[in-house]
Image (cartoon, rainbow, N blue to C red):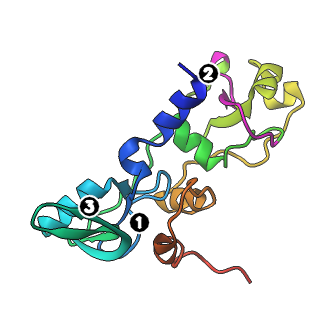
Amino acid sequence: MDGDFRTSFVREPAALKQYPALVLNADYRPLSYYPLSLWPWQEAIKAAFLDRVSIVAEYDAFVRSPTTEIRIPSVVVLKEFVQPQKRVAFTRFNLFLRDEFCCQYCGAKGDLTFDHVIPRARGGITSWENVVAACSPCNLRKGSKSLKQAGMNLRRPPRQPTAEDMRNSSRRFPPNYLHDSWLDFLYWDAELEA
């Protein structure tokens, strides 16, 4: 089987390829930006039918049954507010997102791994404050040495991000596909640049 096919299949499940619905919290903000909170159109229609969401925008496409014709929702808003998570999970993906998908030593983007600033061999722990995104060459160059011994510097010191930090970071990495009806709801609360 072709590797590109497998990759695109994993990234774009069939149900989301055609008419995904952007899901907003009751305050009209997306539940998440990265990954963007999307439901397959079937889930959006089901939630609307069960009166769990309000439909804010629709596609120009319809689904039909023998007795009903329904426009497919493109943006839905939850009727009950879902409290956003305060604590950011320490995961590889969130670490890369915090570090904006670039090596914290040289700034390279692409094939990243992670590095313990204070090496584990020297008592360093795996935590937000001690782990950074690093490209393989920088990670190998540093090895189990301290930054000073390796002659390397960090672009910025690692720290535990807040949920708000992560939301702001994720806005800088929009998904591959954004429907026009979603744009008004994605960035309305972003700070304007002077």
Apparent side of residue 27 relative to residue 147 in the rendered image (left or right):
left
Mark 3 residue element: helix
Pick whichever, 99 or 19, lies toward us: 19
Outermost residue toward the front in this view:
66
Q: Quadrant of the C terminus?
A: bottom right
* Residue 192 rendering spot, x and y as whole percentages: 65, 80
Pick whichever, 167 or 30, lies toward us: 30
**Residue 81 sits in quarter:** bottom left
Mark 1 residue element: loop
Pick whichever, 75 or 36, lies toward us: 75
Q: Which mark is residue 149?
A: none
Does residue 90 belong to the magenta stretch? no
Name the residue rendered at 39%, 43% in the picture: 14
* Residue 171 rendering spot, x and y as whole percentages: 58, 62
Q: Which residues are magenta?
A: 107-121
Q: Which residue has dot 2 on it?
A: 123
Q: Determine if residue 127 is in view.
A: no
- CA gap between label 3 and label 2 equals 49 Å
Mark 2 residue element: loop
Pick whichever, 82 or 180, lies toward us: 180
- CA gap between label 2 and label 1 equals 40 Å
Name the residue rendered at 79%, 47% in the picture: 155
How busy is the neighbourhood of tag 2: few (under 14 within 10 Å), some, or many (20 plus)? Answer: few
Apparent side of residue 166 relative to residue 46 in the rendered image (left or right):
right
Q: Nearer the viewer, mark 3 or mark 2?
A: 3
N-terminal-most mark, 1 or 3: 1
From this view, report whether residue 154 is shown above or below residue 72.
above
Q: Which residue has dot 1 on it?
A: 30
Name the residue rendered at 41%, 65% in the picture: 30
Q: Which residue has dot 3 on it?
A: 44
Q: Nearer the viewer, mark 1 or mark 3?
A: 3
